[in-house]
Structures are given as structure tokens and as C-alpha cells.
Image (tube, rainbow, N blue to C red):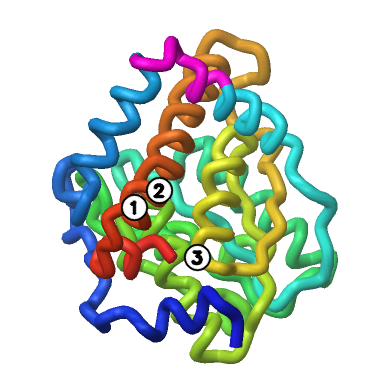
Amino acid sequence: MGTRERQRQGRTSARAFAAPVRATFWQKLGPGGAASLGLALVTVLGLAGLPWLYRLRQVLRGARGEAPEAVDAILVLGRRLEKDRLTAVFEARLVEAESLWRQGLAPRLFVAGGVTGDATRSEAEAGRDWLLARGLPAAAILLEDRSQHTLENLFNVRAHMRAAGWHSLLLVSDPLHLARARATARGLDLAVRCRPAREAPPAPGSPAWWLRAALEAFLLHWYHTGMAYSRLIGSARQLERVT
């Protein structure tokens, strides 16, 4: 048994926090979220933006993804629906995931995402329906339909994989999201490779693309700040959620 697993088993076993359906931004933060957000802001401003620049480099490098390999499951991360319909970003993720499945890289495909915003169905259900319409068999598609954001996507998929005895995951998202998704997955001790949905908007190099890259860099910095903060104060409840 690895050190991380022993540490995890040694913690008090409180149920990990999960945001409610259609959670607001503040509801999604969970234990320690507001404090770690404040620390992330303070460190970026206090250090003249250097932490943000460091994470921006990681976001840009991570956008390239990794060469795909055979795994136990493919995971396509959800995206908020607009009037119960897929956005172009979510559809691009599904297109890439379908392609990987058809290449025989995994026997099953997870679609993740709960009910968010003003939708009346979950992101996972919408993604499944899209894949079924493309001819994928229902038996190959698994749903994670309770989560409200990337961390919960991965936390819940990990629980399913461990229960089934699966170990490796090929994660699909749009390029600028991959660095944060990879960091989160590895924080949860998942064996993961990342694959970009290259057709997902915004167009590379456009103002919208750089704005998204800037935001992802801060979110990645916030994630790492939250991990460091949780370990520093030794909060079992916070660590239960992110490791």
C-alpha cells in the first residue's frame, strides 16, 4: 500500500463535501474554498503576478495533451448546457471521446456532469444521448451525473473506477482545460492521460482564447494553493475532498 493510501485511510472518515444541484459559485467552494481563493488572490497580487505566469506556462504546455494509450476507461468532462443543448465546446469534447473509443483505446466511456445552471437534465445525460445518436452502444456508456465542477467529476469517477477495479483513464477536454484537469486527477491519485478536443472554441490565439488561458492559469494556481493550504492546516475534511 502506498504512502498516500495509508494517509488517506488514516484520516477521519467524514463524507466528502458535494455541492448541491444547480449550486451557486459560493456553494461550490466547499470547506476551505473561500480561504484558499483569498490566498490565491493575495499571492498573485503580492508576488507581482509571478505565480499566475508560472501557471499560464503550464496551461499552454498542457494544451498539447499526450499521445493516447489503451486504458480502462475514457472520460469526457461535461460542460454547462445552454437551454438543455450541448455547447460547441461540449460537443467537441464528445467528438474526440467518440473517436478514441472507436479506435479501441477503451471498452467504456464515462460522460460526467450533473444538473447545472437552468438545465432540466444533467450534462452527462445530454452527452450520453449525443453518443447514442452517433451509434455507440448503451452498454459502453457510463454516467457520472451528480457533479457540479471538475473536481467533483473526477472524485465521483474515481469512486466508480475503484469499485470496479479499473485503474487507468484517458481524460478528454478542451485544450486549455487540460492542465487543471490533469492536476486535479493526479491529486486524486488517478492514473490519467489527457487528450485535447482540438476543435473546441475559442480559436487558438484569438482574444477569447487568451482570456480563457488567463482564467485557467488562475484556477490552476487556486487549485494548488488550496492543496497546499489544506495540507498546511492538516484539515482532514478539506483533504478528503481533493486527495
- Between the residue at mark 1 and the residue at mark 3, the CA separation in whole angstroms equals 18 Å
- Return the residue at label 3: 188
Asked if residue 50 is among those painted magenta in the image, a careful observer would answer: yes
- Mark 2 surroundings within 10 Å by alpha-carbon count, few (fewer than 14), some (14 through 19), many (20 or more): some
Q: Over which residues does the magenta segment extend?
A: 46-53
The residue lying at 27 percent from left, 35 percent from top is 37
Residue 217 drawn at (x, y percent): 50, 28
Answer with mark 1 or mark 3, whichever residue precedes in sequence: 3
Q: Which of 127 and 47 is in front in this view?
A: 47
Occupied quadrant, residue 8: bottom left
* Nearest to viewer (mark 2 / mark 1): 1
Asked if residue 11 is among those painted magenta in the image, a careful observer would answer: no
- Return the residue at label 2: 228
Residue 85 showing in the rendered view: no
Q: Nearer the viewer, residue 179 or 107?
A: 179
- Return the residue at label 1: 232
The residue lying at 71 percent from left, 32 percent from top is 61
User: Measured along the vertical axis of the image, is residue 234 above or below residue 87?
Assistant: below
Amino acid at circle 2: Ala
Residue 41 drawn at (x, y percent): 31, 25
